[in-house]
Image (cartoon, helix red, strand yellow):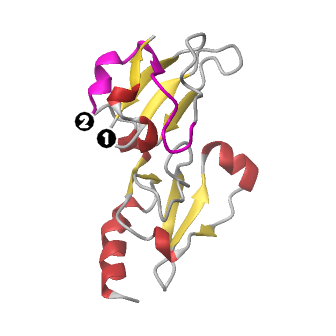
Amino acid sequence: MKKSTRKTINSLRKYIGHEVIRTHPVNGDWSYTADEPILLTGFTPDGRIKYVHTEINKFIFGSKEYILPISFTDRNWITYKKALKPKNNTLNKWIGKEIIMTHPEPMTGDCSFTHKESPVTLISASRYHITIMYNDDLLKGQKSTLDSRFNNPSDWKLA
């Protein structure tokens, strides 16, 4: 195992037993950066991350332990609890208020949050994530954590 991988593993060991989420994608793969926290259970001898699914994914995939590719073994992980804390984002001045995106998300063209008829309520915003609550009839009261593609304050306005 490379020395740099060993150093990364040593810094990630503090997260074993905690739900974690990514702050940045890996080679364009945005997996584990939004509503998909995983429970870090350890590392393989060659440095890959071992984990189990949590929340809704646990019902789908069960309690089986999975292993991520080595490319995911980097320092772009934080605890899910930390991702939900309102910190380092000017959007937090609107906590508890209804907001809408001013234009579709540039990377994917996602316009889910641009509809004036169904604004979302801001729960919190951090440096890498934004947590919202849906207000439409279908998902009313459901919370969702969005990744860094959605946390730019200039992309949002009060509804």
Q: Secondary structure at mark 1?
A: loop
Query: Would you say the residues marked 1 and 2 are in contact, meaning their CB atoms lie under 8 Å apart?
Result: yes
* Residue 143 lies in the magenta-colored region: no
Looking at the picture, which amino acid does disc 1 mark? Arg
Note whether 98 is above or below 53 in the view shown: above
Q: Secondary structure at mark 2?
A: loop
Looking at the picture, which amino acid does disc 2 mark? Asn
* Residue 108 relative to residue 155: left or right: right
User: Which residue carries the number 1 mark?
Assistant: 127
Note whether 148 is above or below 41 in the view shown: above
Quadrant of the image occupied by residue 97: top left
Residue 48 versus residue 76: which sits nearer the camera?
Answer: 76
* Residue 34 relative to residue 9: left or right: right
Measuring 55% from the left and 73% from the top, which residue is drawn there? 69
Q: Residue furthest bottom?
A: 1
User: Which residue carries the number 2 mark?
Assistant: 88
Q: The magenta stretch spans which residues?
A: 88-109
Residue 31 versus residue 100: which sits nearer the camera?
Answer: 100
Q: Residue 137: image x %, image y %?
A: 69, 13
